[in-house]
Amino acid sequence: MVISEKKPFEEILEYLKDAKKVVILGCSLCATVCRVGGEPEVLEMKKKLEENGKQVLGYKILDPACNYMQVRKDLKGLKQELSEADAVISLACGDGTQTIAKLTDIPAYPGNNTMFIGEVERVGQYEEVCLACGNCQLGWTGGICPVTKCSKGLLNGPCGGATKDGKCEVKPEHDCAWIQIYEKLKKLNKLDNLEVIREPRNYAINVHPNRIDLKDVCNKCTL
């Protein structure tokens, strides 16, 4: 899931310093789970903007904000409001905000900061688990990502700097990822995985912006 947090309201007001009429858009998926872009947060933003002299012409929870075709369809229901508005405030993640910006002719400002791809441990608690590096290593690590979980991102660990209680020397509050990997592989009877020297990460496959077209993928499969 994409984890986001609210931007400081003062930063949003600065975006809107020249805007009087505003439309607010949330997102039904990740931002709703993170409690930064669901209906309660959209209504809260509406109230705060109105208290600061802005006119909120309309709002909608997009389902979801990162789906180009769906957002285009959803925004048709706000066609009149968007034609009169000076700006849009997006309470989606950065992906959703860019989709909204692509489909509107007025400025679309982010109301959230996108933090990371993470796991929901429980309501309100999230942990980063994936850097979207483009070359997943989980197949030989027992499902624990060394790229994300190791502070140094090592593929051939451990570094030797872990403390006696199994903590990371870089971030002492974190458990050493490589001790976790060792313990998990031991449990799976796969410790021999650690005897293989891994090639350095190929950063060329992670040049941005990335794009996948499933038609191209299918064509390659038939060759």
Image (cartoon, helix red, strand yellow):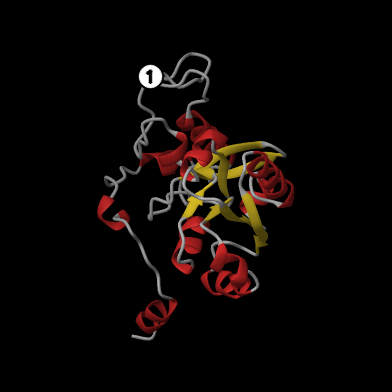
Along the line of sight, the residue nearer the viewer: 18 or 62: 18
The image quadrant of residue 198 is top left
Badge 1 amino acid: Gly
Pinpoint residue 121: horizontal percent, then vertical percent: 67, 39
Residue 36 visible within the image:
yes
Along the line of sight, which residue is nearer the eye, 48 or 212? 48
**Crowd around label 1: few <14 · some 14–19 · many ≥20 (10 Å):** few
Vertical relation: 176 (above or below) 32:
above
Please give left or right for residue 21 compared with residue 108 in the image.
right
Counting every numbered tag in the picture gives 1
Location of mark 1 (residue): 161
Residue 183 location (% of width, % of height) = 54, 33
Q: In percent of the image, x 53 and y 51: which residue is there?
A: 93
Rendered residue at 34%/44% (across/down)? 196
Asked whether residue 27 appears in the rendered view, the answer is no
Going by the image, does 19 lie left or right of 24?
A: left
